[in-house]
Image (tube, helix red, strand yellow):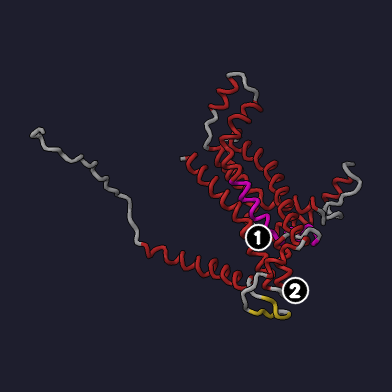
């Protein structure tokens, strides 16, 4: 035994945070708004989804899962599958158009980047419905685009309207900025010296893109794709106007059950089931958005 006393370990001095602290009640307005306009309607949907239809436009408030069991019908499974496929096709078309545009803006534009971004955002200044009607006029078989195609000899007949092609074009056109912006943000944070170093070491431009540019911008690309895919799945206006009602999305079926058949329980059950399905993609979006934030930090 030594006479030396055992000294307790010294604690590191606690750093004092000089960040401003705000009282919690400042979040009350946003929380109240969230509860009234999101949780409130969602609770109403849940109540309707477990109720039963007592007649045309009348509901019997019971607890029944019969509405969810009815979704196993092959007709509604086909609607879910068609919605997913059309949204996936629209997302793929949006990526094929939006990624090269974002790449060109970030890599080759210097003085006019702000102007290019403004031109990308400008369509959002117009109503979604007006933009879709304008596209309907453009794709009309008797419109000026059809006459131009026939005059150039590309095709003797221009029949795009009320087809799946028109729906895909409408989806890509209306949601294109939602993909360009996050991809452009990822490209702007990338160090282009890595690509130059790869080409100096003998890599072809395509190989440098595949091994450097694409992996570094993949979080932004997937985030943009999910930002596009999720609202496309719930689309209602574009299939009705450009598809002529021939391509039923889940949103159109839900709308017809609420407005036409007045079957609120079944429409609510379909909406809840579709929200649960899309929540999987929301979780993926949050994961990649967090990863992109860490990558850019």
Q: Are marks 1 and 2 in contact (CB under 8 Å)?
A: no
Residue 185, image x, y percentages: 55, 42
The quarter of the picture where residue 12 lies is: top left
Measured in 3D between alpha carbons, the distance from the residue under mark 1 to the one under mark 2, in whole angstroms, is 19 Å
Looking at the figure, which quarter contains the N terminus?
A: top left
**Which of the 4 image quadrants contains residue 132?**
bottom right
The quadrant of the rendering that contains the C terminus is top left
Q: Which mark is residue 261?
A: 2
| Principal secondary structure, stretch drawn in magenta | helix
Q: Which residue is mark 1?
A: 274
37 relative to 211, above or below = below
| Local SS, label 1 | helix
Q: Position of residue 239 (x, y in %)?
A: 75, 59
Q: Residue visible at 86% across and 45% down? A: 149
- Place residue 5 in its image quadrant: top left
Is 141 on the left-hand or right-hand side of 199? Answer: right
- Region in magenta: 223-245
Q: Residue furthest right?
A: 156
The residue that appears at 64% across and 56% down in the rendered structure is 231
Question: For residue 2: magenta?
Answer: no
């Amino acid at each position: 035994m030594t006479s030396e006393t055992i000294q307790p370990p010294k604690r590191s001095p606690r750093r004092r945070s000089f960040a401003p602290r705000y009282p919690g009640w400042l979040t009350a307005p946003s929380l109240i708004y969230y509860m009234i306009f999101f949780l409130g309607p969602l609770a109403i949907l849940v109540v309707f989804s477990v109720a039963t239809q007592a007649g045309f436009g009348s509901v019997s408030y019971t607890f029944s899962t019969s509405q969810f069991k009815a979704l196993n019908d092959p007709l509604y499974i086909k609607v879910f599958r068609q919605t997913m496929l059309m949204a996936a096709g629209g997302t793929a078309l949006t990526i094929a158009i939006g990624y090269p545009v974002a790449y060109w803006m970030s890599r080759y534009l210097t003085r006019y980047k702000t102007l290019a971004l403004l031109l990308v955002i400008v369509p959002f200044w117009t109503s979604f419905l007006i933009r879709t009607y304008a596209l309907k006029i453009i794709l009309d078989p008797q419109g000026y685009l059809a006459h131009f195609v026939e005059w150039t000899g590309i095709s003797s007949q221009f029949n795009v309207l009320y087809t799946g092609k028109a729906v895909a074009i409408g989806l890509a056109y209306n949601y294109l900025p939602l993909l360009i912006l996050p991809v452009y943000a990822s490209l702007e944070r990338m160090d282009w010296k890595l690509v130059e170093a790869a080409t100096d070491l003998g890599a072809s431009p395509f190989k440098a893109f595949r091994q450097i540019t694409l992996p570094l911008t993949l979080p932004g690309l997937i985030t943009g794709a999910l930002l596009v895919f999720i609202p496309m799945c719930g689309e209602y206006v574009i299939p009705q106007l450009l598809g002529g009602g021939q391509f039923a999305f889940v949103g159109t079926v839900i709308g017809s059950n609420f407005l036409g058949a007045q079957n609120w329980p079944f429409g609510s059950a379909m909406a809840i089931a579709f929200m649960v399905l899309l929540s999987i993609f929301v979780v993926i979006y949050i994961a990649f958005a967090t990863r992109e934030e860490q990558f850019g930090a």
